[in-house]
Image (cartoon, grey):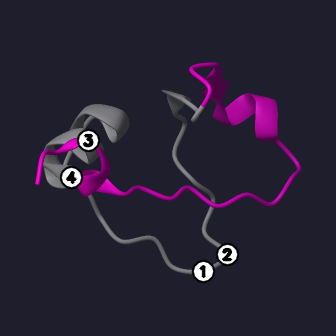
Amino acid sequence: MLRTFLRRLFQGKPTMLSPGTTAPTFSLLDHTGNTVQSQDLSGQRYVLWFYPVADTPG
């Protein structure tokens, strides 16, 4: 599930980024439903955190 999400997000095979590596361009929804784009965060440090089990039953 996470792998599929990352493929859709980054349009290709997901790869682990090393610390300090520039993140690929992205657009996603935050916890309040607002769209966040990588260019909105330009020049800032940020963390992308995925919790794939959050939307699954059980």
The span from disc 1 to disc 4 (Cα, nearest Å) is 20 Å
Q: Residue at x 45, y 71 (%)?
A: 17
Q: Residue at label 1? A: 19
Q: Residue at label 3? A: 55
Cβ–Cβ below 8 Å for labels 2 and 4? no
The quadrant in which the C terminus is found is bottom left
Horizontal and vertical percent position of residue 2 = 21, 52
Q: Residue at label 2? A: 20
Task: Between residue 54 and residue 42, name the one nearer to us.
Answer: 54
Dividing the picture into quarters, in which one does residue 40 lie?
top right
Give the class, few, some or many, for how many residues have Cα within 10 Å of label 3's Cα (few <14, many ≥20).
Answer: few
Dividing the picture into quarters, in which one does residue 48 lie?
bottom right
The span from disc 1 to disc 3 (Cα, nearest Å) is 28 Å
Cβ–Cβ below 8 Å for labels 2 and 1? yes
Give the class, few, some or many, for how many residues have Cα within 10 Å of label 4's Cα (few <14, many ≥20).
Answer: few
Q: Residue at x 29, y 64 (%)?
A: 15
Q: How many marks?
A: 4
Residue sitting at the far top = 34
Task: Between residue 44 and residue 35, name the one nearer to us.
Answer: 35
Q: Residue 40 in magenta?
A: yes
Q: Residue at label 4? A: 2
Q: Which type of secondary structure does the marked residue at label 2 adopt?
A: loop
Closer to the eye: label 1 or 3? 3
Instruction: Please name the amino acid that badge 3 sits on.
Output: Asp
Instruction: Please name the amino acid that badge 2 sits on.
Output: Gly
Reply above or below: 11 against 18.
Answer: above
Q: Which mark is residue 45?
A: none
Reply above or below: 27 against 12.
Answer: above
Instruction: Please name the amino acid that badge 1 sits on.
Output: Pro
Horizontal and vertical percent position of residue 18 = 51, 79
The span from disc 3 to disc 4 (Cα, nearest Å) is 11 Å
* Stretch of the chain drawn in magenta: 32-58
